[in-house]
Image (cartoon, rainbow, N blue to C red):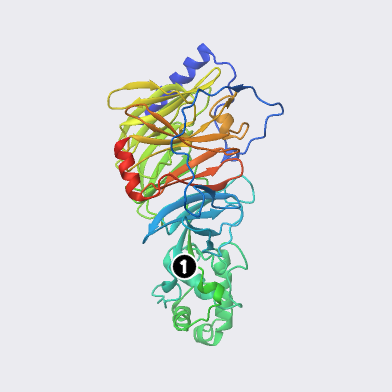
Amino acid sequence: MVVLILAITLIGSVLWYLQNGNSGGTKNGTSIRDFLPFGQAPTEPPSVIPPPTTPVNPQNQTSGSELPRLRKISEKPIAGALAFKSGESTLVRFVDKASGHIFEANVQDTNLQRLTNTTMPKIQEAVWAGENSVVLRYLKEDEETIESVVLKLVPRNEALKPFEFKKNLKEGDMGTDVLNLQRTLNRDTETVIAESGPGSKGNETNRFGPKTTEAVKKFQVKYSDQILKPQNLETPSGLVDGLSREKLNEITGVNIEQSKEEENLYQTALTFLPENIKDLAFIGSLQKIFYLEEDSLGTIGTLADTSNQKKVQIFESGATEWNIHKNRNDMVISTKASSNSIGLSYSLSSAGSMKKILGGQFGLTLNVSPTKEKAIYSESTRDGFVLNLYNVTQNKILKLDYLTLPEKCVWSRVSPKIVYCAVPKGIPAGNYPETWYQGEVSFEDNIWMMNSETGEETLVETFNLVDGTDLFLSDKEQYLFFTNKKDSQLWSLRLFENETTVVESGAEN
């Protein structure tokens, strides 16, 4: 019934649009090649709509601390970041876009530490699932297939613990046994899985593929007196049988010397998710990942743990263009935003029940508050777009004075009525939001804070040449982090001098 209702609604929206028309639209829909697209800059400078009058910034004052209030964390493009509390320190971890290496920084100093040596080039997106787990998404060599891999940081004190192989293994198997099989084989230069990439030392996976089979065969030949001859075998099978397990268990008890560099790095475990996942998010309230795939009938949504186990399908639709909102805690899905199509947005429970939030606006894109009582949303107009505040419980709409896209905002969790946004100083003309998504236009932003109950807007920080996106806050919301869409580099902004001030300020506003 849900599928039928969604299909009828979407068809009706398209027909309505075709009858009424909309100038300046772009094509609707996307292909695999549109995954995290990077469009070309316009050949002529676009016209600019002047920004509204802005109030004086009462908070933009220099700090007496050694580090600047606003500073760049990374010097290279990143694919995704996460902040968390460790003792008295606020740490931020991020994935280097070019190499897939994970780095860690402390907001209170300028040191940058590399945590992993797992090389996976050209990461397009990194979705963090807790401080020690991240989903890396990239295009395979064919430039069409989307690969999604869960990378887990293995605690240093557990990396070289002996492992007992208790069951036979073969090509096609997946799980912890396979991961430890690859680690054991990679201890010996004669039996390594691969020289680089997935399966190589430090990049072991939980998938028993052809390369693992070949490595097992080399292992069986090397120890033929103990594995092959007792079974009267002349050629290796590539199957991890009883005698192969006995030899593997013998090797796992041998201590391996580590270099100083290896001692300072985490080992990693890789788990491959299904290919061509269209969108994926980590749902903090459930500690699970939720992802969307296309099938012959449309779209299906799956909820699973980060090892892709205990999978439950909780969503299906005849439409193919859906996005998951990356609000890190709840499941909110919307139809793909386009200036020439009417959008729909729903909250989704872990049992699969759906509740409509908004619908009927062209180019609909929104950002829902943690309590789901409010949402800021934009809708396309002939001149660009407008930004509104929607009170879900009261079904009331308030037009906001400034213009930005909801993807450039983040809601406070300390005080859920507060929202921080990267607000452009001017809006180039275009078909929004896809003009910005595809990189055809770029903004120069300031950071604003808005009280969603009173409508009061406060200028927090001004800067140049920054197009802020992927905003998130530290645990106590002393720091705001964002990525500059122009170069994909990570920035931090200290909002308050101490955590107490954060809570008090949120209460006062």
Task: Return the x and y of residue 114 as percentages of the image width and height.
Answer: 54, 63
At 60% across and 77% down in the image, what residue appears? 189
The answer to whether residue 250 is above or below residue 377 is below
Is residue 274 rendered to the left or right of residue 440? Answer: left
The one nearer the camera, 326 or 301, is 326
Which quadrant holds residue 176? bottom left
Whether residue 426 appears in this view of the structure is: yes
Is residue 177 rendered to the left or right of residue 214? Answer: left
Q: Amino acid at mark 1?
A: Val
Mark 1 falls on what kind of element?
A: helix
The residue sitting at the right extreme is: 43
The one nearer the camera, 263 or 216, is 263
At 57% across and 51% down in the image, what residue appears? 123
The one nearer the camera, 232 or 334, is 334
Identify the residue under disc 1. Answer: 178
Task: Return the x and y of residue 25 as percentages of the image width and height.
Answer: 58, 21
The one nearer the camera, 459 or 274, is 459
The answer to whether residue 204 is above or below residue 233 is above
Which quadrant holds residue 327? top left
Q: Quadrant of the C terminus?
A: top left
Q: Quadrant of the N terminus?
A: top left
The residue sitting at the top extreme is: 20
At 56% across and 77% down in the image, what residue appears? 259
Whether residue 275 appears in this view of the structure is: no
At 38% across and 75% down in the image, what residue appears? 166
